[in-house]
Image: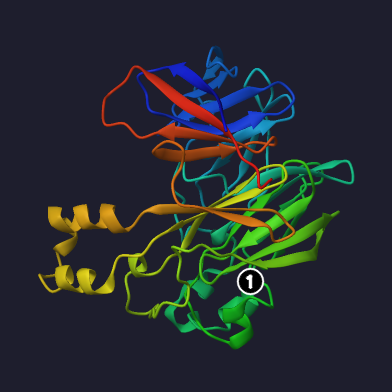
Amino acid sequence: MFLDSVVVTSLSELYLSDKDPETDRLLLNDWEMNELWVTDLKGNTISKYSPRGEGPHQVPSPLEMAFWKDGFLIKEISPGQHFHFFNGSFEKSAKGPALADGISVIGMPNSGNSFSLVESKGEPLIVGYEYNSIDARLWTKEEQHAGFYEKAEMGYLYDPNSGKVVNFSLYPETWTPRREGKWVGIAYPRVQVSKIDPVVAVLPNFGNQLFYYTLNGDTLQPLAEIELVHPERNDKIVFDVEKDDWSLYPSFGRLHGGGEYFLIEFNTTFPRDIYDSFRAKGENFHMDPDYQEARRKYVQTKYILTDTRGNQAAISELPVSGTVHLMDADDILYIKPTTETELDYNVFYRYQVSLE
């Protein structure tokens, strides 16, 4: 159901990173994260900061950001993948411990937060995934087998008060590839937490399983496992992880955590026969305008809305053509419409979603 829209005046392309449920403030940034904007729900600017830089209250390479208490939280791209904490005046108050020791995978800005903020037993906790947190040796070709799923712990629970970091596996024992001892690649799992309950969702991008856990202190207790279904997604399709292009598999993408619901994104597949016909033209077929047009036609984003009880709904198209930037605690989607016209403003449409 359409509610209203947020219009922010800016020539810069803005990405919506977070919403403060207590004050209804929105947190936005430009693509390079040179600017951070705080607005109200109408899009009126409340404050504006410059997070990127070498200054005492800046971060050299910011990647993700969120509201934190009365201030802000920024995760950086660096060998340590640290968090930086800022007060409401954007003065840096602390820097978190290293979550990694080197860079094997480079995160892409504005591709969805890899972490969620939650309270557990009255204490703040950051729950997320960091692909660089595992031993670098696990990224070698020799470790690319099903045994990887037994060793890799890419999830983390980080207590900012104590500095304690607890790592955990994102490959549940009942995840089909792990249970069957089948290598299907890294499967880059996503993690999100409900914005109203201490429920953690874990989603490997391969297969059809979504896993829910209850957060209890710094431990995760299995809550539920559901099979995701969409009429336009065939997860049983023949796919060779060693040889095939990932456009030939309906991989899960972003995972959005709301209040009662979670929203899952996936891409439809490029038909193999059409893909092979382009591939036969030579190794530079990706540059062919006809190939790019065909990819836009066949590889499209679809959605599944689900709760923790297994109720779900397949969504083939958004109410407006665009991209989901955020799902808030009230299960409201913030959708930025697609436009090829340069505008002097950014608009986000707000839609209420429900399974009822």
Q: Position of residue 254 (x, y in %)?
A: 52, 52
Q: Is residue 72 placed above or below 76 in the rendered structure? A: above
Q: Position of residue 92 (x, y in %)?
A: 64, 27
Disc 1: which residue:
171
Front residue (pair 344, 335): 335
Q: Residue at x 23, y 69 (%)?
A: 275
Q: Quick check: can you spot residue 73?
A: no
Q: Is residue 190 left or right of residue 29?
A: right
Q: Is residue 287 placed above or below 147 in the rendered structure? A: above
Identify the residue at the far left of this view. Answer: 281
Amino acid under disc 1: Tyr
The quadrant in which residue 14 appears is: top left
Q: Residue at x 63, y 56 (%)?
A: 312
The quadrant in which residue 354 appears is: top right
Q: Quick check: can you spot residue 323?
A: yes
Q: Is residue 59 left or right of residue 175?
A: left
Which colour scheme appears in the figure?
rainbow
Q: Element at badge 1?
A: loop
